[in-house]
Image (cartoon, rainbow, N blue to C red):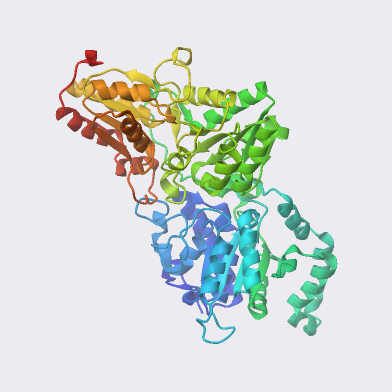
Amino acid sequence: MNIPLLSEIRSPQDIQDLNDQEMKELCQDIRAALIEKVFQSGGHLGSNLGVVELVAQLHRSFDFSKDRLVFDVGHQCYTHKILTGRFNRFDTLRKTNGLSGFCNRKESPYDVLTAGHAGTSISFAAGLAEGHKGLGGKEGEDPWSVALIGDSAFSSGVAFEGLTQAAEKQVRMVVVLNDNEWSISRSVGTLARYLSRIRSSRTLNAVYDRVQSLAHRLPAIGERMDEVGEVIRHVLVPGHVFEELGVNYIGPLDGHDLEQVESALTRAKRLGGVTLCHFLTEKGHGYEPAGTDPERAHGVSPRKVPSPVNQAARAASPKRQAFTAVFSQALCRLGGADTRIHAITAGMPSGAGLSQFASDYPSRFHDTGITEQHAVAFAGGLATTGKKPVVAIYSTFLQRGYDQVFQEVALQQEDVVFCLDRAGLVGQDGPTHQGLYDMAYLRGFPGFQLASPRDAVDLERMLAAALSQKGPWGLRWPRGTAVECLGLAAELRPELTPGTAERLREGASGAVFALGAMVEHAMEVADRLSKEHQIELEVWDARFCSPMDQGALAGIARRQPWLATVEEHALAGGFGSAVCETLADLGAQIPVSRHGVPHRWIEHMSSREEQLELCGLSTDVLFSEWKNLASRSSPVSLSKE
């Protein structure tokens, strides 16, 4: 049989009749295509290159039109997408109206779970397996549930919760552990060390290799090689945690060797119940640069064609820097002056901006792995001892530790600072990664200070204020760059007392109460309205969502014909909602126009800017809406106050 072109594959059925050599060549074709396509579109490269053989063999060993395959996180599903008929759309990967960079139920019936968070696959697959009981008609013929999970995600507490429940129920499930020692950065924790001990057992590997070399001369051994390997492993690596939980264990095996993968999956199906197949893989396998820097190969940006640079425009534009970089530098400066400051991340030291702090102050840096609940509770304990923990985490991932924020931090009024990166729209990563709900789920906690910087100057000032004051704080900023200074210089700005806003612009045509990065948009729109239509808006940087500046809002209600709020957050329960609640409590009456993310799921798009446009948060859309508001209202005298 000829190896099918990737563009000709419509379903996994198209590869069922390939022999071993043809499967190897197909995997080579997939790997080459991934390197080419991902560099064009951007996306997760290293994780996908590491699982080509695993995913290809899974689709040959199971029938996922009936069985179910659940990817953990889903950022390693590109081979799966190719084998389920989506290669012809790969040029649209992570682009507007194109393929998602993760599994997505809307794309294919083979995508069982729209996911983007770690540690969830085993629990979800166990639920599928329980729900499928009896569908096969006979015992042992129910559909299989398969969970593909990485070693770092496997360290999540919820992964073990799912595994123990599945073992207790003895559901028909296979857990494929893709062990490459990395998540985005290197895996941490005792489980990682435990897996490493299994992985690196030289005696085990040497004996196992010796038995394999004899297999071709001793057919009886060759026919039962997997069982012989298990006997050797039990002798040399006894007391496996998994088997003590009631889970069958097979491994560790080479996840790039199709024959070993096929043999393990076949045996897992014979064993029944819950079986963990432990495969060793190399992140970025087949792509040489990944061998020296797996973290950098984790996610790549699309290659850009160089274009002429308008030097005059560059010189005229304000100086900008990524919010994450500004935070990193500020935390290192503050950490150098105060040894009580500790930094905590849940498996993302570089993404959260803590790599430099980890290098400068290793004894005060804590990477807990993908364990957000533990990370937050750990911070509460640190704070109780008089330390000043800073929890740096993506907004969407803090949702996983919500109960710990409530009990271990907010209820105790601990001095913990949550620094929420990616708070807002995130472009190509899509709905699982949008940070659109943090204000809604944090502002309800009494005594919780929730602020958002408009520029680099205020990010550093807010971080310093949070670390110098009592009680929990949350600082949020988007995935983007911050202007260095918007408005007054640092020394001229009002003190960052919780619940105090800052007026940046005067006007009588209406007022805008903006938060965070949207302040820059508000100022740009106000300046355009002034120049083009002589509409003068009063613009405020709210600075805080909780507590709210009641005095500022009361004054606006007395002197302005209308008020607009603008935020990069879900409108439901967000900053605009908090403003309206405050006005209602004050008994103030003023028309309010809220601008934020509408009450629907926002799919992935090529850029955050496109999503801002879609949500009515671009400067052009705001310009049009505020112009219409001003044209329908009569300006009032500034002396009205």
The image position of residue 373, as x and y in percent, is: 60, 47
Tally the numbered discs.
Answer: 0
Q: Which corner quadrant holds the C terminus?
A: top left
The residue shown at (50%, 26%) is 459
Q: Where 194 falls versus 125 (above or below)?
A: above
The image position of residue 411, as x and y in percent, is: 57, 38
Q: Which of 235 and 50 is in front in this view?
A: 235
The image position of residue 62, as x and y in percent, is: 55, 75
Q: Nearer the viewer, residue 17 or 69?
A: 69
Q: Where 152 falls versus 595 (above or below)?
A: below
Q: In which quarter of the image is residue 179?
A: bottom right
529 sits to left or right of 241: left
Can residue 25 be spotted in the picture?
A: no
Q: Which of 18 and 192 is in front in this view?
A: 192
Can residue 224 be spotted in the picture?
A: yes
The image position of residue 417, as x and y in percent, is: 57, 33
Q: Where 383 falls versus 55 (above or below)?
A: above
Query: Which residue is the extreme one toward the bottom?
Result: 138
461 sits to left or right of 637: right
